[in-house]
Image (spheres, coloured by chain):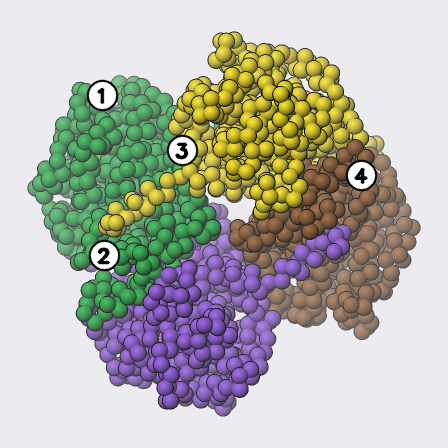
Chain colours: A yellow, B green, C purple, D brown
Amino acid sequence: MITSEEFLGRIRRMRDNIYMGGKLVKRDNPQLMPGLRVIMLTYDLATDPQYKGLFTAISHLDGREINRFTHIQQSAEDLMKKQDMTRIGIHRTGFCIQRCMGIDAMNALSVVTKEIDEEKGSEYHQRFIEYLKYWQNNDITAACAQTDVKGNRKLRPHQQADPDHYVRIVEKRKDGVIIRGAKNHITMASQADEIVVVPTRTLTREENDWAVAFAIPADAKGVKLVNRAVAPRAREHLTSPLSELGCSDCFVIFEDTFVPWERVFLAGETEFAGRMALMFALYHRHSYCGCKPGVTDIMMGFTALVAEYHGLEKAQHIQHKIAEMIGVGELIYAAGIAAAVKSEKSSSGTQIPNTIFANVGRRLAGENIYHEYNILADVSGGIPATLPFEEDFFAEETKDLLNKYIIHNEQIPAENQHRCYRAISDIICSSFGGWSQIVGVHGGGSPIMETIALLTNYDVNKKKEIAKYIAGIKD
Amino acid sequence: MITSEEFLGRIRRMRDNIYMGGKLVKRDNPQLMPGLRVIMLTYDLATDPQYKGLFTAISHLDGREINRFTHIQQSAEDLMKKQDMTRIGIHRTGFCIQRCMGIDAMNALSVVTKEIDEEKGSEYHQRFIEYLKYWQNNDITAACAQTDVKGNRKLRPHQQADPDHYVRIVEKRKDGVIIRGAKNHITMASQADEIVVVPTRTLTREENDWAVAFAIPADAKGVKLVNRAVAPRAREHLTSPLSELGCSDCFVIFEDTFVPWERVFLAGETEFAGRMALMFALYHRHSYCGCKPGVTDIMMGFTALVAEYHGLEKAQHIQHKIAEMIGVGELIYAAGIAAAVKSEKSSSGTQIPNTIFANVGRRLAGENIYHEYNILADVSGGIPATLPFEEDFFAEETKDLLNKYIIHNEQIPAENQHRCYRAISDIICSSFGGWSQIVGVHGGGSPIMETIALLTNYDVNKKKEIAKYIAGIKD
Amino acid sequence: MITSEEFLGRIRRMRDNIYMGGKLVKRDNPQLMPGLRVIMLTYDLATDPQYKGLFTAISHLDGREINRFTHIQQSAEDLMKKQDMTRIGIHRTGFCIQRCMGIDAMNALSVVTKEIDEEKGSEYHQRFIEYLKYWQNNDITAACAQTDVKGNRKLRPHQQADPDHYVRIVEKRKDGVIIRGAKNHITMASQADEIVVVPTRTLTREENDWAVAFAIPADAKGVKLVNRAVAPRAREHLTSPLSELGCSDCFVIFEDTFVPWERVFLAGETEFAGRMALMFALYHRHSYCGCKPGVTDIMMGFTALVAEYHGLEKAQHIQHKIAEMIGVGELIYAAGIAAAVKSEKSSSGTQIPNTIFANVGRRLAGENIYHEYNILADVSGGIPATLPFEEDFFAEETKDLLNKYIIHNEQIPAENQHRCYRAISDIICSSFGGWSQIVGVHGGGSPIMETIALLTNYDVNKKKEIAKYIAGIKD
Amino acid sequence: MITSEEFLGRIRRMRDNIYMGGKLVKRDNPQLMPGLRVIMLTYDLATDPQYKGLFTAISHLDGREINRFTHIQQSAEDLMKKQDMTRIGIHRTGFCIQRCMGIDAMNALSVVTKEIDEEKGSEYHQRFIEYLKYWQNNDITAACAQTDVKGNRKLRPHQQADPDHYVRIVEKRKDGVIIRGAKNHITMASQADEIVVVPTRTLTREENDWAVAFAIPADAKGVKLVNRAVAPRAREHLTSPLSELGCSDCFVIFEDTFVPWERVFLAGETEFAGRMALMFALYHRHSYCGCKPGVTDIMMGFTALVAEYHGLEKAQHIQHKIAEMIGVGELIYAAGIAAAVKSEKSSSGTQIPNTIFANVGRRLAGENIYHEYNILADVSGGIPATLPFEEDFFAEETKDLLNKYIIHNEQIPAENQHRCYRAISDIICSSFGGWSQIVGVHGGGSPIMETIALLTNYDVNKKKEIAKYIAGIKD
């Protein structure tokens, strides 16, 4: 395990390939630092003794202690610990802990590379294991690049007018493959050491070129990252954990990029593309079963806090809204636990969470995120939308007036009430808040994707048989 | 374990104390038989080899195999098995398996009698153990009588104009206690060997007389059961499992009824009344986490079946409704699993499910029951409401016409389509269906009771602390 | 206008053609009387001076006062009055006033017969006017038979294996047409003088035989009605308006039935079949905008009443549920008003309600009916499901005990509390209640039918143009 | 009527009293111009011939044509026209048209000043008429300042530790009154000529000092505006109507501000404070019944547009979401129409919308705003959250790549697709979007305020009487 400063140093040494606002920017650009601070936190928590065993794990490769964000799930207990780590992590950031997607992709690769080898006699799994050693030895942070830009959504990859609309192999060489295309919505790619690329969907026989998975340094030659950074409005006087953190999403563009064979984990085996896509989604949806309860904890905490400051904490309708949030958060968390309890060991030894439970959990999260914002807005009143800017609370002509009139509870310092409103404003009334809502719907797969996964995997026919029995229908 | 026929014989030998429709009726009255058949099924399933270990358990008292409906939970695994038993049982009845409430009450007594003894030096727990032996030896079926009639709901028990509005001890004698009052909504009391009585709420110091728990034979002297039976409309030609089964609820009235001390498990220790009430509720809410998924399975099965018969199974909006049902059923089930995983061992050795998860699960069930009926009604169309009576399908003048016009799918025999509609009509368009809806809301405690339990037990302050940390508020 | 007794006499003189429970039954059979009493009420209210101008209207044909249930809408005001009549009618029955469907069909015929004549030079409209005179002169009650049995729902009428699965003309004769087929879900056909038959869907060119509309006496030769009656459980002691009323639905079967030309209003003009189907649906959905608010008034009234009896009327969560009901009822009512305000005059002079508003109103009704039952169940507690039968409240052994324990409010006579619970039990825990729920979803067209109507009629493109303007997109 | 340029000139001549970001700023500061452009639009539309009679009205004072934003409602038709004007206005701005609040306050004053005079013999109404002439002659734009900062919400105004927490009269002088306190959440106060101040709640006898209503120039001596401006991110290349517009909210602070008697409309008559507060709320909620349907039109338009660009317009689940939006928008609109149809004339001649319908309409709006954002987010996918900044689409290194990969529909220019995403990003993923959500919940009164208004004004007892009649309960 490395320290957060070591990580930052490593990031700073990377090649400049991030574009933002029309310019090539440094990785530690002020707009990117908030996002980097979140990743740094994942290093700090792993070295914090109180989180030993939670943010750390024991490598199944060599028995050494590693950051749990580099661990391959070995048991139901591992899956539950990952949920807990994620939930606790969110308590420290106030939102997305970001580093889960890379390890979720690694777990998917660990399962599917083995399965390919078993059927094809290939050697992907051994490559993967070597790459994993590199990960664990260097405490790597990676983004997972899954979602292609997709072009015309009614057409399959090979039917697109522009074949690059799904990432593809344009050439296979002796030493590796040449990649072209773009992946979109790639969270924290600009803050990561590496990018792990996996397919976005099932593929048909004609689509060998699009059946590709690989890992690549985020600053590799031929990789361009067009970045959109988001963070709460910077503060001058009233900094807080939330006000220092942020996130980024990238368009990751491959312009005939070379990837050596030892980093390629799928190259043409179309029948495994869908399996790999779904396996990543499954691990990531299970992550959400720890993540979203953490987000609900934050939303609930602010709902209860602002109600307390307004003297309305005991109001029945507010209490009932809080109880609703408890229901959403804990049902999702329970779904994650059930997915762990009903998990199964794959041929690779990696533990796979149960599909049904991971999907009902993730879907509930996606369906309720806007509702939770609604509750917090409801209980806060209009103040998060109309709160004067921070500077006015410190300017001569206005500070005393604002501090006089902001007070709703004489027992609580004006600054605390101000801080509470400002944090809520950052959460529900900012571009950062809008980003969080949309990520809450779509990250890890939108509710409709989970609905599709459920309908594909659930045995509805068995329920029809039960109905027939009850009704006395014999076929 | 005994057979269902032995059980029925035992029931038939009981004293007549059931009133229905203005008359004193036999226990095997035709209106009561459908309910008795459900109980009989719980004996049959326990002796069916395929359900060994599921409908049976190993007694922790003597290591013998017993019906799981007489088992005291010893582990998280026991709790999960009970969920599964309940879900499977419902697949055989189409609705409430009924026998869970007695054993839920027994589990509550096992925990709380021990706790009283620990604090008071009493000997309730030993009495309980003796009574439990009687249960396991005789494979006893019991109702649990918890809900008092309550009189004026804004007043406490001791403030009521009529003190009998909560069941109470009117006299303590050397050999036992004299009980007066009534319990309402007591499901299957008329089909049970015994009635286990527990308090319905927390009590204050003035309310010693109302702090009472005991067990009594259902036909004991001084006990009157005023019964309301409910079942699908009886069939002449097209009988089916569903059409043969039913349920009953009783007003259980104690008219100065004597209960010997060896069957008394609480008698004046007011500070344990609430604990006992909540402990029964907790076990019963955990039962719902297996029960309700079973009910959802039935509702989903019929939704899918009628859609298939109408050729609409692939319609997206129907698929999405089925996916909604999957979500509800499996989230509740997951909550039950989480309640087991996070369960704790009490001082008595009995395993107690986690309160938060049991309550979020049960509440989700209660909140969605009407919605599931809505879905099935939606997909079925009007036919469950307008289906001609069974006899018309067999009468000379109408049978050919009805069988001609009932057909929506030429591949399926008319009788099967007819059976499907008739079963759905029984489920959603009958007094039995209305009963099921209301039981689905209130049985085991209404959603608002779970909301109260959640608000009482959940650490909202911890969430406020997280919010404060995020916002940079130091107290 | 005639009296209710005259109506009943007329009904009693009709030919026996109603089958129920496997037998041919009289029209005033005890199971049918509850439904007849609802129709009789529509005659009584029209002769009650306090409802003059509401339950009566002025015929546009001859200026005479007529029952509004025989009136053709002439203005927006007429449409609003019809809403009000329906709502008030429901306040007297507690549920469906039933007689609206016939006049809704007549209004549809009045519009479309004129339109056919205009395009085809036919003389349907004059026939219709003559038939309308017969209606108004005789104060006729009619059912509307629209819904065909439909067979395989994925096939069109002319593609069915059995062509009779949609009602059709099997022969055109000089003096009339011969009809074969069946209509299903035909409410109150067994309580009506006449049946007005209209198409159920749009038709294609090949489907001339299925393009048929006509009116026929309900007891005509060749018409069989297979009836399902529904009513609250009959009472012996505590009769009340609700307990005396009921409803029926029929399978209306035409076995090569002759209809003379003067009663035929569509016979082969396929291009008008859809128009006629939708026009009836439109009038009927507008009726729902008066009907459903009336039903909500009843549900809300009982919710408030039982809350009062339980001393919980001021509880915030109950108040909020009542406020929800206000919202549902009054939004539907407002939609009806808006449909009237935005109504248009057809070429026949008949006023047509606005499609968008009638459909958003009806859909809201259909989407919320189960939710309102849920609210009433929620607030009532379990008692509607477990209330002992009426006789037990009057039997020697149990009456005093039940009257003692049923009391929740000492200020209110036990009988009133008992009556309240029994009425709620009839409404939410009976086959009658199940029927009401399903009718509430499907009567007048299920929510999905309104969704289709909205998507067909709403100018979404105009909204896209607005979006483009806002976004600066020029095509 | 004046032109928008005349308005802007007038605004520019005002005294500087706006504070923002810690500084005293000009009224045409770049951050304030977007909001001013919205107000300017209300002048432009009134002089646009195609909107004559919609954005203009005829003054009831002198028969001259005036901007409808300065008109006192004289009829149900006026109320409906105002709804339509608001809805059309929103089609031009994409969100809040802002100018309605001033005229809503004026209508409230017109009603209540008359009522005070009738009871008190005062002369407020004549003052109001004189002030109205000034308005209409000068085509005045005003903010309405209603919401006090409120301090401790559980205490009444006169119980506050700081009496200034509700705006109050600190001195009555011969020539006028001296005002102290602050109003919060005052939209567009920094863009208005005038501020009309009304009470925020009912008052008790002890609260004479807080019973005050008046009008004041927005730049009057003793008035400080602390402003928070909000607008979509400014664009360099792809400007559009939406990207040019914005809004502001102010803390309006009165520091012993003098108001002459001729501009005072309430000064101590506590019994009319609540009436005035509710009357403004009522007019403003009726405005929402035109406003919110306009917002829904925008949201629906973008939902349909992005679905079209993605080739998914015909997908059933997207069609159903659009149909849901139709339902929400048109039910609210219908509620406004019903509020107009059931409106009543006050003693002043001013037409008052119906309370029940205005409140059920406004509440539906507030309850659904987050849901509509959810739908648009759902259908758009993640792109509004991850779209690279505008500049990257025009920078050499990235523009071709981004334009290549942004394409989802070859028939549509890349720029149009880009513009569509960027507009949606502005709407749902920006501080402006967060502001719009919160305003959508709280503007004009939160849903819970409408619930309270409904419970206060609705005759629930009448519904209980109906229930009693149905149940046969006689008191």
Mark 1–mark 4 distance (CA, rounded to whole Å): 76 Å
Mark 2–mark 3 distance (CA, rounded to whole Å): 35 Å
Q: Residue furthest front?
A: A174
Q: Which residue is mark 1?
A: B60
Q: Locate residue D74, reporting x and y percent.
A: 71, 70
Tell me the kind of residue under disc 1. His
Dot 3: element: helix
Q: Nearer the viewer, residue C86 or B393?
A: B393
Q: Which residue is mark 2?
A: B233
Dot 2: element: loop
| Figure check: C355 above or below A306 | below
Tell me the kind of residue under disc 2. Arg
Q: Which residue is mark 4?
A: D394
Mark 3–mark 4 distance (CA, rounded to whole Å): 50 Å
Q: Chain of mark 4?
A: D
Tell me the kind of residue under disc 3. Ala
Q: Please indicate whether residue D462 sits to the left or right of residue C383 in the image.
A: right
Residues marked 3 and 4 touching at CB (< 8 Å): no
Q: Is residue A348 visible?
A: yes
Dot 1: element: loop
Q: Locate residue D152, reporting x and y percent.
A: 64, 38
Q: Locate residue D228, reporting x and y percent.
A: 76, 41
Mark 1–mark 3 distance (CA, rounded to whole Å): 27 Å
| Figure check: B374 above or below D150 | below
The mark that comes first in sequence, 1 or 3, is 1
Mark 2–mark 1 distance (CA, rounded to whole Å): 43 Å
The mark that comes first in sequence, 2 or 3, is 2
Q: Chain of mark 2?
A: B
The mark that comes first in sequence, 2 or 1, is 1
| Figure check: A267 above or below D360 | above
As drawn, the label of residue B334 is: 3
